[in-house]
Image: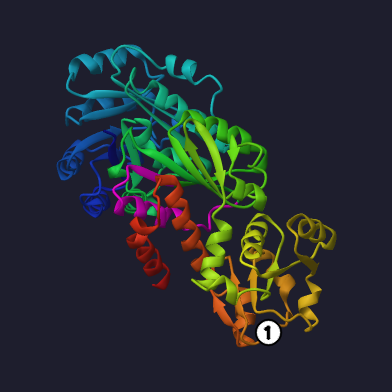
């Protein structure tokens, strides 16, 4: 079981004790980064050591490996030996330290487990096995490697390596930087010996390090183990999404041994990401822009409904195959129309702004319900082609600015940054207007619709409906009934 360690940058003893207290019971133990101190005072550090509960790691990192120790190496080795007198459970020592010194410490303090650590701040080596092999020597009982992730592929490669090695060596592998965040969240799933976190955001001592509260409360890492399965959002960008908050709460409510993370994946990396994820315990994905159409030829099979829609927003792993589905269309229509009878909708006019994957899916579902659909876009040639494929009407966005386009329903699928193109739109009073963008709640489109006395539906309604359908697919439920409590939780979250 991976130990969740609160990393304490010890700049002074008083503040360090406050941070230890602030960590409370969230942490299983503490890594005391003593290299932040200008001088080592054994008596003061003894007080700090006694203030810690659980496992304790001492680290006196040299500058060449990303630390802040100020004095000569000879002085540092002497300080390490003196600090060992305080009997920490572990001492993190760089892999390239003098081997004779490692042997000396190991034999003098046999109860202290020595961790050999190695950092690569430039990137992630292609040959991680050789990278680790160079570190191994007698005296070390554990190993820690931390490499800069310059892509999501780097992070996934390191995760695969750690998981592969977990039964043969006591190892902790971390990808540094924003693109390596997923490796920190998934640490218990990979089989890492330690999961590192800061107490406060400002205390992070490594790029990409998360806080204890984020790991425990949002990602619920204390529930995770090497048997946990992973779900993820694939898109670019993904920072705005709150799916990781809601899906992880849902897994907790449903007692599922699963976690949901966000992976920012550029279009060029999408095929390679799915290849790596196939080897790791990924069980499914949410798919957002710009991958809803691009992922279709990459997955093993696409369901008939998603193929007809021309877009995939949900992927499920079944019998070692990636299967593509779409919950956008049904989710959007249920959010817009609720349980309205089909007969009441025939020939009602729905205007959809945009012609990407979400617009395609919604159009398909709307046509099935008997609605008349018009797609609008700035690129007339593009929207005419999509409309021809789907069997609906199309036009330039300027149509809605001219005031002669009457409609009962309107759905905007344009991202937030593109909505200024809709300035000056004329909305039909009393029409039902929905934006699939849910952050912020009152988008540029909805603000105009409110002013025109329309009935407005914020995008989170669609998010909830399509997310419930995703959970149904991922978890193999026959109906949505088992997700009633999850639906209420999601509605409460957005209502706050």
Residue 248 on the magenta span: yes
Q: Nearer the viewer, residue 247 or 342?
A: 342
Q: Most extreme residue toward the front, as rendered? A: 343
Q: How many marks?
A: 1
Q: Nearer the viewer, residue 172 or 400?
A: 400
Q: Nearer the viewer, residue 349 or 423?
A: 349
Residue labelled with disc 1: 428
The C terminus: image quadrant: bottom left
Where, by quadrant of the figure, is residue 476 drawn?
top left
| Residue 44, image x, y percentages | 19, 42
Q: Residue at x 43, y 33 (%)?
A: 281
Q: How is the image coloured?
A: rainbow
Image side of residue 110 versus residue 203, left or right:
left
Residue 92 on the magenta span: no
Q: Is residue 444 above or below residue 2?
A: below
Q: Most extreme residue toward the right, as rendered? A: 381
Q: Residues within 10 Å of mark 1 (few under 14, many from 20)?
A: many
Where, by quadrant of the figure, is residue 454 drawn?
bottom right
Q: Is residue 468 above or below residue 324?
A: below
Would residue 148 be seen by someone viewing this image from the given angle? no
| Residue 479, image x, y percentages | 40, 55
Q: Is residue 2 above or below residue 13?
A: above
Image side of residue 78 versus residue 203, left or right:
left
Q: Residue at x 21, y 24 (%)?
A: 112
Residue numbers of the magenta segment: 237-260
| Residue 346, image x, y percentages | 64, 73
The N terminus: image quadrant: top left
Would residue 18 be seen by someone viewing this image from the given angle? yes
Q: Is residue 217 above or below residue 426?
A: above
| Residue 84, image x, y percentages | 21, 27
Where, by quadrant of the figure, is residue 337 drawn?
bottom right
The local secondary structure at tag 1 comes to loop
């Amino acid at each position: 079981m991976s130990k969740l360690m609160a990393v304490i940058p010890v700049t002074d003893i008083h503040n360090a004790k406050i941070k230890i207290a602030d960590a409370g019971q969230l942490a299983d133990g503490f890594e005391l980064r003593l290299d932040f101190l200008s001088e080592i005072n054994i008596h003061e550090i003894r007080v700090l050591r006694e203030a810690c509960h659980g496992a304790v790691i001492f680290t006196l990192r040299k500058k060449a490996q990303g630390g802040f120790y100020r004095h000569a190496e000879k002085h540092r080795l002497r300080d390490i030996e003196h600090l060992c007198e305080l009997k920490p459970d572990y001492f993190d020592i760089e892999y390239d330290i003098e081997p004779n010194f490692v042997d000396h410490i190991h034999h003098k303090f046999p109860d202290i487990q020595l961790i050999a650590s190695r950092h690569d701040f430039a990137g992630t080596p292609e040959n991680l096995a050789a990278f680790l092999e160079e570190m191994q020597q007698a005296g070390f009982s554990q190993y820690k490697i931390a490499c800069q992730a310059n892509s999501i592929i780097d992070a996934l490669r390191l995760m695969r390596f750690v998981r592969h090695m977990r039964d043969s060596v006591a190892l902790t592998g971390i990808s540094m930087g924003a693109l390596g965040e997923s490796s920190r969240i998934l640490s218990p799933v990979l089989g890492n010996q330690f999961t590192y976190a800061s107490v406060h955001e400002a205390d992070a001592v490594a790029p990409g390090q998360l806080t204890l509260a984020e790991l425990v409360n949002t990602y619920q890492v204390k529930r995770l183990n090497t048997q946990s399965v992973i779900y993820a959002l694939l898109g670019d960008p993904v920072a705005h999404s709150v799916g990781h908050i809601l899906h992880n709460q849902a897994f907790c409510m449903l007692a599922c041994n699963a976690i949901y993370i966000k992976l920012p994946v550029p279009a060029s990396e999408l095929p390679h990401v799915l290849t790596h994820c196939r080897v790791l315990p990924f069980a499914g994905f949410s798919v957002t822009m710009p991958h809803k159409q691009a992922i279709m030829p990459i997955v093993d099979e696409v369901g008939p409904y998603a193929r007809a829609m021309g877009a995939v927003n949900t992927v499920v792993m079944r019998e070692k195959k990636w299967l593509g589905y779409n919950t956008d269309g049904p989710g959007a229509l249920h959010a817009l129309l609720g349980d309205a009878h089909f007969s009441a909708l025939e020939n009602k006019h729905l205007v959809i702004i945009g012609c990407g994957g979400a617009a395609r899916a919604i159009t398909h579902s709307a046509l099935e319900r008997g609605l008349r659909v018009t797609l609008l876009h700035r690129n007339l040639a593009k929207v005419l082609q999509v409309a021809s494929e789907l069997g609906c009407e199309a036009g330039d966005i300027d149509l809605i600015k001219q005031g002669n386009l009457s409609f009962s329903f309107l759905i905007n699928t344009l991202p937030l940054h593109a909505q200024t193109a809709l300035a000056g739109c004329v909305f039909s009073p009393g029409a039902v207007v929905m934006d699939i963008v849910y952050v912020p709640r009152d988008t540029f489109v909805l603000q105009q619709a409110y002013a025109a006395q329309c009935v407005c539906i914020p995008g989170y309604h669609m998010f909830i409906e399509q997310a419930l359908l995703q959970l149904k697919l991922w978890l193999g439920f026959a109906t949505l009934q088992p997700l009633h409590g999850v639906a209420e939780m999601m509605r409460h979250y957005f209502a706050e």
